[in-house]
Amino acid sequence: MTKRILIMGLPGSGKTTLALALKERLGAAHYNADQVRKDFNDWDFSPEGRLRQARRMRDLCDSSDTEYAIADFVAPLPEMREIFGATLTIWMDTIDSGRFEDTNKMFVKPTDWDFRITEFESEYWAQFIVEYLN
């Protein structure tokens, strides 16, 4: 069974940069929320749309034939994180606000994570996380 890695945080926090570094080191599948929304032509950012996106990201990860599947998306709501059901959660806590005011307002800081990253050092953190997983 594929292990789901959630990289979450505000837009511009470095989620995709870390995801790509991890993908390379782990040989993992990678799903970026913006690309997934584009692929499904689903730009609904209502609470219902956001929950649908969390289910979609989970299902895409589960369809992967790799040991690890990485989803990088904002996941501003605790319900989204619960729906996704990560094996490992990485919170990119590198910025105080992102470029979308509505997302900033609705973002609920997580109370549960495996890694809380507070600096832009994706290569360092990718290697650290890989060593943790192995």
Image (cartoon, helix red, strand yellow):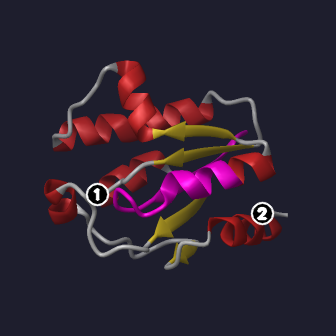
Q: Is residue 92 left or right of residue 115?
A: left
Q: Which residues are magenta?
A: 1-21
Q: Which mark is residue 130?
A: 2
68 horizontally vs 106: left or right: right
Q: Using residue 46 as the reference point, say whether residue 19 is left or right of it.
A: right
Q: Position of residue 108 (x, y in %)?
A: 27, 67
Drawn side of residue 9 relative to residue 96, left or right: right
Q: Which residue: 49% across, 40% down? A: 32
The quarter of the rendered structure image containing the C terminus is: bottom right
| Viewer-closest of 106 and 34 | 34
Q: Secondary structure at mark 2?
A: helix
Residue 15 covered by magenta stretch = yes
Q: Quadrant of residue 76?
A: bottom left
Q: Is residue 12 positioned above or below 69 on the image?
A: below
Secondary structure at numbered mark 1: loop
Q: Position of residue 7 (x, y in %)?
A: 52, 57
Q: Amino acid at mark 2?
A: Val
